[in-house]
Image: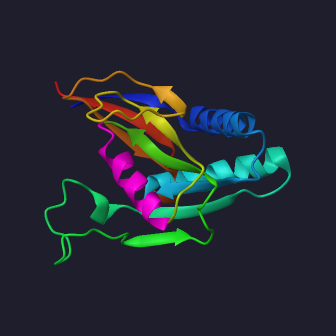
Amino acid sequence: MAQNELIDGPSMVRAVTRIAHEIIERNKGIDECILVGIKTRGAFLAKRLAERIEKIEGKPIRTGELDITLYRDDLSTKHANEQAHVEQVDIDYLVVNQKIILVDDVLYTGRTVRAALDAIMDLGRPAQIQLAVLVDRGHRELPIRADYVGKNVPTSGSERIIVNLQEVDGEDCVILYKED
């Protein structure tokens, strides 16, 4: 497989900083906002965004993490009553009437985001849900779009995008893999 580095470490820092500024600007501050990272890499990106936002605003933004595994529509096994539940939620705040900003690494078909939307709605009714992604690669199967994008990368169905983060993989980069 041929590979091409799309985003290196410094470019990732710039993308996260830009997204942080866009979140602050669009929401006129951060008072009613909660950053919620979709595990695994989205959670680490949400923490990075929170650090940037705190440096810019001079105060912390509320954060949380969400594991949407059992909300996936492609999951073959659910509970006996056929209802999914959130496998792991680390959101210590009421989401009712708050602006939730979901954070993920790659937006592809939209199915992960759909699952996250269901999980958030089970916690309460937020005022608004926004989506921030590091990479949008297209090929949506659902009518979902990101509000904040680090980089748009048109891809073919045979290509793969891998996001490496220092916290998980020991380096920061985004790589596009193409079949030869």
Q: How many marks?
A: 0
Q: Residue at x 35, y 21 (%)?
A: 154
- 2 or 19, which is in the foreground? 19
Front-lying residue, 84 or 36? 84
Q: Say which residue appears at 83% left-offset and 47% top-offset.
A: 57
Q: Give the image quarter of residue 176.
A: top left
**Residue range of the region highlighted in magenta in the rendering:** 109-123
In the depicted structure, whether residue 48 falls above or below residue 110: below
Give the image quarter of residue 87.
bottom left
Look at the image and say whether residue 118 sits in the magenta stretch: yes
Q: Which residue is more in the foreground, 88 or 18?
A: 88
Q: Check the image and name the residue furthest to the left.
A: 76
**Left or right: where does residue 20 sit relative to residue 76?**
right
Residue 80, placed above or below residue 96: below
Q: Position of residue 108 (x, y in %)?
A: 33, 36
Q: Can residue 39 be spotted in the picture?
A: no
> Is residue 111 visible to the viewer in this orientation of the structure?
yes
Q: Is residue 68 left or right of residue 128?
A: left
114 in magenta: yes
Q: How is the image coloured?
A: rainbow
Q: Residue furthest right?
A: 58
Q: Residue at x 68, y 37 (%)?
A: 17
Q: Position of residue 28 (x, y in %)?
A: 77, 39
Q: Position of residue 53 (x, y in %)?
A: 74, 47
Left or right: 71 as drawn, with respect to 129: left
- Name which residue lies at 38% across and 56% down: 118
Assign the N terminus to one quadrant of the image: top left
Of 9 and 83, which appears nearest the observer? 83
> Residue 180 at x, y = what percent?
16, 24
Q: Main secondary structure of the magenta part?
A: helix
